[in-house]
Image (cartoon, rainbow, N blue to C red):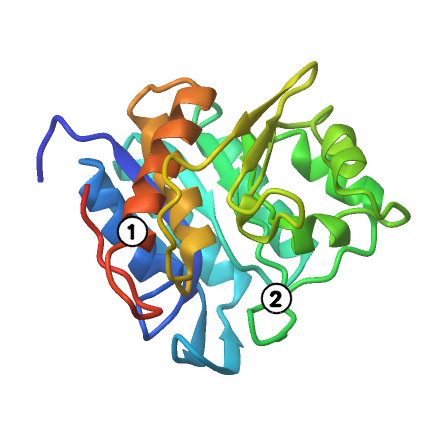
Amino acid sequence: MSANRPFVLSIAGFDPSAGAGVLADVKTFEQHQVYGFAINTGNTIQTEMEFFEMQWTEMVFVLKSLEKLFENYDIKAVKIGIVPSLDYLKEIIFSIKKLSPETKIVWDTVLKSTTEFNFLSIENQNFLIEILKELDLITPNYNEILKLSSNEIDTNSIAVKLSKYCPVLLKGGHNPEEIGVDRLYLKTRFFSLAPNTNIEIIGKHGSGCILSSAITANLALDQDLITACINAKNYIETYLQSNLTKLGYHYV
């Protein structure tokens, strides 16, 4: 283990196809020259094409894992993926902040699978805001951000509202107006991150997950948020063009 590499942690589900979840995150971390740890929030039965079943990990087991890792390593950044509830998410986030207040946290707001399996529903907006205040970034896509608001249907308005509490990267894969254009919302401004190429790409299982883990790795490497997002976008575009299947290849 290299003493020169920062430590980064993925807290997410186990996808046996390795296209998403902790396996994909650790692959991404390795390519970014950071050392990746992983805590499993749940086991899934799925392929890159179909989702079948989910079995969640008990919260006490996740918290014990967190405690042991943070006791032994200086973890600079954490990426959080699928969780079963806001209570579960809050326990994780507040435990991290208690163990290491300076650790950066990115939440990839995976609320359902691409095959419509629901992981998490947002029922309490105030509870959500309490969580957002502890985060360094959330990375919803255009479908997910609609579920983060109780009464709005305009994605731009929702992103602006949520960015008062933490930065929001609205991932552009489902952007109905500008496909592939991500939008980074900060408290007082936003940035459009356009694709670097006009080459037609093949959609990949877990691409949003990989983008979020690439940003997390870049933050651990002390890149500012805008630079981290730009570099992560470059990485995911290379990944999306790596082959013609739903399972991409990781390389810088």
143 in relation to 154, above or below = below
Mark 2 to mark 1 CA distance (whole Å): 22 Å
**Few, some or many C-alpha atoms within 10 Å of disc 1 (few <14, some 14-19, many ≥20)?**
many
Q: Which x, y percent locates residue 77?
A: 39, 33
Residue 65: mark: none
Q: Which x, y percent locates residue 177?
A: 66, 44
Q: Amino acid at mark 2?
A: Lys
Residue 112: mark: 2
- Residue 67 makes an appearance in the image: no
- Residue 158 makes an appearance in the image: yes
Q: Along the horizontal axis of the image, is 161 left or right of 209?
A: right
**Nearest to viewer (mark 2 / mark 1):** 1
> Closer to the N terminus: mark 2 or mark 1?
2
Q: Residue furthest bottom?
A: 52
- Comparing 176 with 208, the one in front is 176
- Comparing 230 with 168, the one in front is 230
Quarter of the image with the C terminus in it: top left
The quarter of the displayed image where residue 138 is located: top right
Q: Disc 1 marks which residue?
A: 239
Tell me, yes or no, whether the two marked residues, 2 and 1, touch with CB atoms within 8 Å: no
- Residue at the image position 52 percent from the left and 32 percent from the top: 98
**Is label 1 in a helix, a strand or a loop?**
helix
Q: Amino acid at mark 1?
A: Tyr
- Residue at the image position 91 percent from the left and 48 percent from the top: 151
107 in relation to 84, above or below = above
Q: Along the horizontal axis of the image, is 131 left or right of 152?
A: left
Q: Which x, y percent locates residue 183?
A: 59, 32
Q: How many marks?
A: 2
Q: Which x, y percent locates residue 240?
A: 33, 54
Q: Along the horizontal axis of the image, is 120 left or right of 56?
A: right
**Is label 2 in a helix, a strand or a loop?**
loop
- Comparing 129 with 197, the one in front is 197
